[in-house]
Image (tube, rainbow, N blue to C red):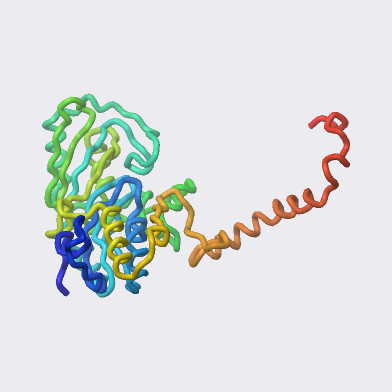
Amino acid sequence: MSKRSAEDIELPAETGERSVHLDVFNNAVLLVDKPLTWTSFDACNAIKGAMKRLGVKKVGHAGTLDPAATGLLIICTGLGTKSIEGFMAAHKEYSGTLKLGEGTPSLDAELEVNERLPWEHITDEQLVEAAKKLTGDIEQVPPMFSALHHQGQRLHELARAGVTVERPARPVTITRFDVHRDASDRQLVHFYVGCTKGTYIRTLGHDLATSLGTTGHLVALRREAIGEARVDVAWDVQVLVDKLFAAIREKQGGTEEDFKPWQPRGVYNKRPRNNKGRARGKGKQQQQQQDTADAPAAAGQLAAAEQPAAAEQPAAAEQPAA
């Protein structure tokens, strides 16, 4: 399969003079720049809407990015999805910023600070030396706020319910860990990391802080590269989607009203629902449980609806005090 970069994808030019070959998406690899707060599945779903119009059934991404992170996300379509495992195994590079002295449950800025420790004692030399000690083959304990599973549930779902479980450490390799203090705010540490598959940068930053006798959390994280693919040539997701739909309208006809803009679901929203407001797929069991829990309330609402009109009820002043 020939791998296509963002510059290889043929989409309508602003002048409308460039030819468009939408059949490439039957076997495509797209480089996109994931926006802040979007989940990786949000980015995939943005592309899926266009792919359905083209009859392309398979769409997947090659490695999750946290909602609080931005940067390179590789989305594969059609036969291109066969390349996903190869991209997931590739070396990755990240840049970001760690804030010393303040910790959060998620180890990033998604949740509020719940821990504060002194950080002023840390020198620049100690910071660089601590980063060196975390370079090479190391073991990491995955964070509770992650997409890993424990007995059929994702860890981040358990974490949001206030549950913490034991997580075995995993071997990873850090090939590069450069750090330097911010010029105007010494509490901020900027970094650049090269690493193997399965590395949690949030954990790496937190481990750096704890090794220096404090705590910390990421206030910024950006994936710069996956293998040879770099974010510099990646598509803005919305620009890509707009150009795709413009090309599809040109080929298949229709108006802009037929191609309503897709809205990201986001990390805090519930599972997508069908047109009856009920959960789809894996959410069916949860929906049944919710229906059971809602039954008493629903019965109460029905009983209330069967009561006489307000004019037939005793005046409010005649009711006993609560």
Which residue is more in the foreground, 98 or 138?
Answer: 98
Q: Is residue 229 left or right of residue 166?
A: left
Which residue is more in the foreground, 242 or 153?
Answer: 242
Q: Quadrant of the N terminus?
A: bottom left
Question: How many numbered marks are there?
Answer: 0
Q: Quadrant of residue 28?
A: bottom left
Instruction: Report x, y in % for residue 229.
Output: 15, 58
Instruction: Report x, y in % for residue 194.
Output: 15, 51
Residue at image point 36% right, 69% down: 53
Residue at image point 18% right, 52% down: 231
Instruction: Report x, y in % for residue 270.
Output: 48, 54
Position of 249 relative to 322 (above/below): below
Q: Is residue 195 visible?
A: no
Residue at image point 34% right, 48% down: 67
Residue at image point 39% right, 56% down: 262
Position of 104 relative to 290 (above/below): above
Q: Quadrant of residue 17?
A: bottom left
Q: Quadrant of the C terminus?
A: top right
Position of 277 relative to 183 (above/below): below
Q: Is residue 231 visible?
A: yes
Which residue is more in the foreground, 68 or 252?
Answer: 252
Which residue is more in the foreground, 253 or 221?
Answer: 253
Instruction: Report x, y in % for residue 66.
Output: 32, 50
